[in-house]
Image: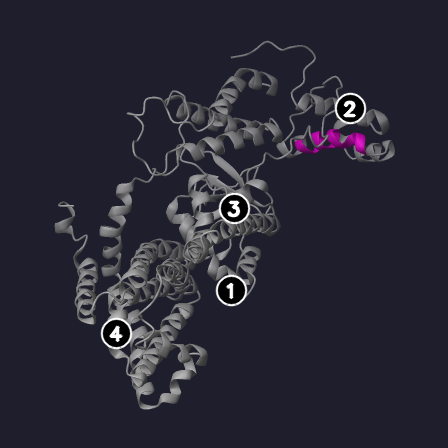
Amino acid sequence: MSRAKAPPTENEALPFDAVRRVETPEGVTLTLRVAGPLPRLYAALVDGAIRGFAYSLAAIALSLLGDLGEGPFLVTLFLGEWGYPVIFEVFRNGVTPGKSALKLKVVNGDGTPVNLTASALRNLLRVADFMPVGYAAGVLSILLTKDFQRLGDLVAGTVVVHTGSPRSRDQLGLRVPDVPPVPPPVPLRAHEQRVIVGFAERVETWPPERARELAGMARGLTGAGGQEGVNRLLGLASWLVGRRLRAPEERR
Amino acid sequence: MSREIFEARYSGDWDRLERILKAPATRRKDEKQAPTGTLFPARLTPYDESELPELYRRVCHQLALVRNRHYGADLEDRLNGLALEAHEVLYQSRALHPRDLARFFLVTFPRRVREERLLVLVATLLFVVPAVGMLIACTASHDLVTTVVPPQVAAQIGEMYGPSGREARPGSTDLAMFGFYIYNNVGIAFRTFASGLFFGIGAIFFLVYNGFFMGAFAGEIGHLGYETSFYSFVIGHGSFELTAIALSGAAGLRLGFSILGPGNRTRATALREEGREALPIVGGSAVYLVIAAFLEAFWSSSSVFPPSAKFAVGTALWILVFLHLSLSGREGTRNAA
């Protein structure tokens, strides 16, 4: 099973981006946002707390049986330690309660849901991750591998990914100001478009002097400096995000 | 085509796909068409089945266009998320059927054990040689017992297997011991396997250590002269338990050797492939240990039957284990099952 790798595109993430690219049989590249050590630690703590709570409930309930309850309690302990993650990952599509709280999920390396084999492997090898003490091997492995995989993930071929939708540009307060769109005088390349749109999205967060200073760098394109340069860039950005003066006729 | 027109034209697809994916996973009404009796019911949503793949392919196409035309990262993220979720639903693995579990135990497990017979032999020797060696050494020199068996435990051996120990044991103790055997023994098998990841060292350690321990334990029994009581006790569940320890050790060695000798694969690939190959052996060992826990708690400890009956049944169980591992799931017998 070789790692799905898409040919580099203009959208290729920077090398340090925490994403994993998966090429599907449909020929499109999907992006998985792999989760780092900290959210996973929190998820493990939540799962641990839930298990501990369940054990105490079981202990109270089984203590009513007296000596007879000791055996069932040990079986509960066994199922909790070894079965809990596997049962949730298989029946709930890769999500334990802890992972659910942190909006995480286990998937196969190609983005498909984990099956029993993968889940059993990654959770059996939790023992190896724990060694020599306190998940040292697992943390080391997470820090050293590109997709934050602990040893169990490496053997099972799984990754832990974020499931919550990333905040949109609108939610981040990034919006191109509403100014009349102006078509660019020359065709612009993709990264040039990005720079202009990025400028427009952030322009309101800078002091006007700083905006004018930055816009001055694009004098070659806008043919103007100062506030006029800023305004012309905003017009271009408005055009680049698809705004038009009047609703254009739909072309086939 | 501007982004606005693109969105106006295709957002119907996206909303529809979103609704299908968000629909709660309910069983369809027409149970007959759904896979019946599945242990892990697949995620079924009430929609026309031909619709999802088609919508998924369309969204994939649109995602590629959005990227190529730089319509914006927010739109790209939305379509990426949709495609990812649909991809998951479409490419999920087949639901497990109860029949699969039977097939696993009767076919896959013994076959994998036979395929790894060399490693199983190595693991068995790593376990048996220290055990026999320790037994001989402890028989010769009594002091050696406490080098592996803690003195408190050694002191209890006399109580456990002496004439008084086996008589009155309440049923609750049997149940408690069953729970303990499950928790402890199956856990040891899993640890033996997992720690094999470190170049096989962990698996070797557990095998050799358990061998030494049992050899010393048996040595102490010999000194006390409780052989009949002890061996009639262990022969019943020993077939499943000792075999399972050797098997989980073999699975751990498989894991470790995949890093040491990956062949013409990368070590990461070798580890993934060998892990998958080793897992059935660990699973089978766990089933063996559950059987052993039942036998150990409720049969081996029973004082109703005379030792001769226990030796007879124990021998039969050993034969059963050997037959299972050597014959079950062979090509010729598979169709009959």
Q: What's the magenta region?
A: A194-205
For mark 4, what is the residue? B231
Q: Is residue B92 magenta?
A: no
N-term-proximal mark, 3 vs 1:
1
Numbered disc in front, either 3 or 1: 1
Residue type, mark 4 in image: Tyr
Judging by the rendered image, the residue that carries numbered circle 2 is: A232
The reply to whether discs 3 and 4 touch (Cβ–Cβ < 8 Å) is no
Q: Quadrant location of the N terminus of chain B?
A: top right
Residue at 34% x, 75% y: name it. B214
Q: What crowding class fits label 3: few (fewer than 14 Cα within 10 Å), some (14-19), or many (20 or more)?
A: many
Residue beneath the point at 45% across and 30% down: B86
Q: Secondary structure at mark 1?
A: loop
Image position, residue A224 (x, y; %): 82, 27
- Work out how far the residue at label 1 is from the one at label 4, CA to CA, in angstroms: 36 Å
Local secondary structure at mark 2: helix
Mark in the foreground, 1 or 4: 4
* Residue indicated by mark 1: A131
| Amino acid type, label 3 | Val
- The mark found on residue A160 in the picture is 3
Q: CA distance from mark 3 to mark 1?
A: 20 Å
Is label 3 in contact with label 1 (beta carbons under 8 Å)?
Answer: no
User: In the image shown, does A204 or B83 lie closer to the viewer?
Assistant: B83
Identify the residue at image location x=37%, y=22%: B50
Give the mark nearer the N terminus: 2 vs 1. 1
Q: Position of residue A82 (x, y in %)?
A: 44, 54
